[in-house]
Each structure stands twice: as structure tokens, then as C-alpha cells.
Amino acid sequence: MNIGVFLLIEPFASVEKQLQRAKEMGFDYADITDTNAGGSMLGTAGFSPTVSLDGNPDALGVNLDTGNSWLGGADPVEMAKVFKNKIHHIHWKDLGAEWEPKRGTLYGCGFSTIALGDGVIDIKGVCEVLKDADIESSTLEIIGSEDILKKSAQYLRDNGL
């Protein structure tokens, strides 16, 4: 499985600078979000890049987000088991114990600030379920030092990914 980073390594830096920093840290993949106005203009012109799942239910895929699923009250390990054959991408994050009182009351947290394996989410269990799945890529949704990102990537590799 390819492991990339979310492209917010240096706040307010250009995309080119962010990609350069990711490459310097040893990452060949990155999630980039296009926030240009052109995307919304397509909808007003009658273009809608959607399809009905009624016509093609095999086209459904899942992006497993370990942090957001856990924070919302789900068990990411169970989600990995149930959706294993439908998971096409993973957003990896672990959350510290300070998030436990918020579990089931918040449904998204954006990024983690700690390395995978240092928090309360069973990341190792998710790896165990998915280590033989055919998932091409994933993203570390973690902000912080280069050490935290590298430690997280190594944690995934050490656990079979």
C-alpha cells in the first residue's frame, strides 16, 4: 500500500513547496484539494459528475477514515472487516485520550497531531484486517513534525502495510 501525506506540511506555503517537502521526507504520494472556483462553475453549466448507484452498485467504494469513524462512535476495526472489499483509500489518524469524552458527539476532526500508534484508536487492528487487502493508496491525515509523519509511516509498514 502506498502511503502519502495530506499536503498541509507547511501552512501557507505553495503547492510546489509542499510537494518538495513531502518528497524530502520520503513520501511519493500526497492528497491535494482543489479549491478553485472552476469546480463549482461546472455545476451551474449543467455538468454533474455523478452516477446512480442503482445503475451500478459495484461502483461504490469506501474511504475508511480511522479517526473520524472512531470519533463518531464506530469501531474502525469492525468497519475494516465489514467493508474490506469496498475500501479503496484510507485516511490514517490516531487520537489521544483527550478525545475520548468527545466520542459520539463529534463527527469529524480533520487532522491528528500525534503519530499512529500513540493514541487510543486500534490502528494495529485495522492494519491486521487490511494488510492483505488490495488497497493501492492511503493518506496520513496528521499535522506536525517530520518525525511524527515518518514514525507513522513506519508504524504502518511495521504492521504489514
Image (tube, rainbow, N blue to C red):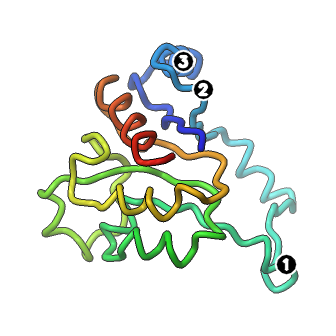
Q: Nearer the viewer, residue 16 or 114?
A: 114
How far across and how far down the image is residue 119, in percent? 21, 52
Disc 2 residue type?
A: Asp
How far across and how far down the image is residue 154, in percent? 39, 34
Q: Which residue is mark 2?
A: 28
Q: Quadrant of residue 120?
A: bottom left
Judged left or right of residue 97, residue 57 is right
Q: Which residue is mark 3?
A: 23
For the point 16% across and 66% down, the residue is: 100
Judged left or right of residue 131, residue 105 is left
Disc 1 residue type?
A: Asn
How far across and how far down the image is residue 86, in percent? 65, 69
Disc 3 residue type?
A: Lys
How far across and how far down the image is residue 95, in percent? 25, 54
Q: Which residue is mark 1?
A: 56
Label 1 secondary element? loop
Q: Which mark sits nearer the N-terminus, 3 or 2?
A: 3
CA gap between label 1 and label 3 equals: 38 Å
Crowd around label 2: few <14 · some 14–19 · many ≥20 (10 Å) = some
CA gap between label 3 and label 2 equals: 6 Å
* Residue contact between numbered discs 1 and 3, judged by CB atoms under 8 Å: no
Label 3 secondary element? helix
For the point 44% across and 31% down, the residue is: 8
Q: Which mark sits nearer the N-terminus, 2 or 1?
A: 2
Judged left or right of residue 23, residue 159 is left
Q: Which mark sits nearer the N-terminus, 1 or 3?
A: 3
* Residue contact between numbered discs 3 and 2, judged by CB atoms under 8 Å: yes
Q: Nearer the viewer, residue 130 or 50?
A: 130
Q: Which mark is residue 158?
A: none
Crowd around label 1: few <14 · some 14–19 · many ≥20 (10 Å) = few
